[in-house]
Amino acid sequence: MANEDLRNIPSAYLFEEVMRRYKCNFRPLGSAVFIGPRYAGKTTQAEKLAEFNCWCHIEPNELIKEHISKNTQIGKFANDQIDKGKSIEDNLIVQAVVSRIKEPMCSHGAVFDGFPLNKNQAEIFDSEIGKFNVSIDRIVSFEATDSTLVKRANKSLDPDSKYAGLLSLETSDKYNDKVADVIKHYKNKKNVIKMNTIEGERAVWTRLRNLFSKNDPDNK
């Protein structure tokens, strides 16, 4: 993109981007961590918040896939671990995340979707972001009952699929055990907020917008 001649870009697109950046000046700087089990709705809300506050939406799995597709050094190491049937190392995942927040498009802030996933990732990440003057303002823990998660998961499947209605998920209890150390790690440092997603997507978004839009000129 750096080598692209701006004269070849339609004026409408350039104007739209200039206006977007201007409006971003009125959005609050900051970052947030969204954690929660699959189908709890955190990714949907992370995408909304990122768009609303001009923040980056950073989801580690998608980020690793991107590195692999681009055959970067991180991607090569990750692909090698996958080929060997191993889990991708925490340090490598953190490297991928840090490489993204260094980009100019993330200068306003970021929503970390499902990251850090464990205490080790959190500790490595803390030591890295300190170098870039990045701070985590809030940790939002998305919560839902197992029955709600299973219902949402099955709804996402093709109703004609032989797996419809039979999907088994990792229970929220197991997930909570998995990330309990992450919450404990941040609890004494950050504002940890529990978000009950049973109340619905719109209600959750309204609450999140209020939490993260203190400097929003449209929210007075």
Image (cartoon, rainbow, N blue to C red):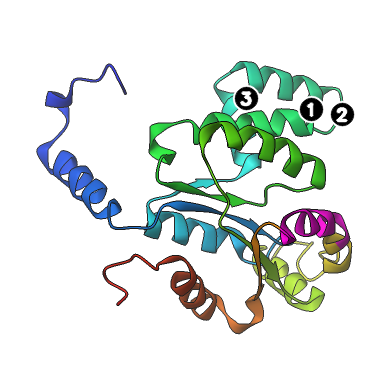
The residue sitting at 17% across, 31% down in the picture is 9
**Mark 2 neighbour class, 10 Å CA radius: few under 14, some 14 to 19, many 20 or more:** few
**Mark 3 neighbour class, 10 Å CA radius: few under 14, some 14 to 19, many 20 or more:** some
- Specify which label sits upstream in the sequence, 2 or 3: 3
The answer to which of 40 and 53 lies nearer the viewer is 53
The quadrant holding residue 51 is bottom left
The answer to which of 164 and 197 lies nearer the viewer is 197
Q: Quadrant of the N terminus?
A: top left
* Secondary structure at numbered mark 2: loop
Q: Residue under circle 2? A: 85
- Specify which label sits upstream in the sequence, 3 or 1: 3
Q: Amino acid at mark 1?
A: Ile
Q: CA distance from mark 3 to mark 1?
A: 11 Å
Determine whether label 2 and label 3 are within 8 Å by CB: no
The residue sitting at 40% across, 46% down in the picture is 108
Q: Amino acid at mark 2?
A: Gly
The quadrant holding residue 169 is bottom right
Give the extent of the magenta segment: 177-188
